[in-house]
Amino acid sequence: QVELVESGGGSVQAGGSLRLSCALSGHTYSHFYWAWFRQAPGKGREGLASIYTGDGRADYADSVKGRFTISKDNAKNILYLQMSSLKPEDTAMYYCALGRPPLPGSLRATDYNYWGQGTQVTVSS
């Protein structure tokens, strides 16, 4: 049973930083894609960044490129999202997800099978 548990969310002022973590357990895949998504109230789920466990390839949405960094600790099975220069529009529930999308670097929510419960990030101006 695959389980993903996010942590690290909270409230921060604009311009600040946060690091999110996602702990993985129960998987049996040798390689897979790990990704971060977010969903603001009244909006769809937005893909932010993905990373491939095989070669570490990382892909980013334009909205976060240069501000957010995805990384992983293979030994600990933990995924990270380092967020900097945060803006009020980054306020959302943040989710990590695991999948094996048909296209490398996919940030489509439908390409991911397993999801965490989410962690809230609130950025005030």
Image (cartoon, rainbow, N blue to C red):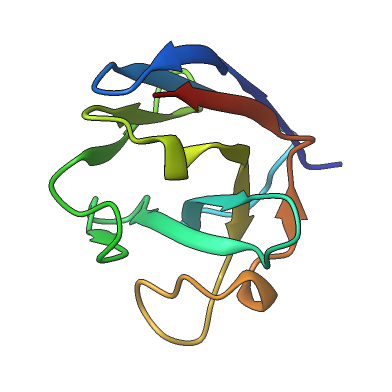
Quarter of the rendering containing residue 74? top left
Viewer-nearest residue: 75 or 42: 42
Viewer-nearest residue: 43 or 73: 43
- Does residue 48 lie above or below 84 as drawn? below
Q: Which residue lies most toward the left here?
A: 66
Q: Is residue 44 left or right of residue 48?
A: right
Quarter of the rendering containing residue 70? top left
Count the marks: 0
Residue 38, percent from left and from top = 58, 49
| Residue at 43%, 75% in the rendered image | 106
Residue 24, percent from left and from top = 63, 31
Residue 65, percent from left and from top = 19, 54
Do we see residue 46 in this rendering?
A: yes
- Does residue 28 lie above or below 86 as drawn? below
Q: Which residue lies most toward the right here?
A: 1
Do we see residue 32 in this rendering?
A: no
Viewer-nearest residue: 32 or 108: 108
Q: Is residue 93 left or right of residue 52?
A: right
- Does residue 65 lie above or below 96 as drawn? below
- Position of the N terminus, as image quadrant, is top right
Viewer-nearest residue: 45 or 16: 16
Residue 98, percent from left and from top = 61, 54
| Residue at 67%, 48% in the rendered image | 28
Q: Which residue lies most toward the front here?
A: 125
- Position of the C terminus, as image quadrant, is top left
Q: Is residue 14 left or right of residue 31?
A: left
Q: Is residue 80 left or right of residue 95?
A: left
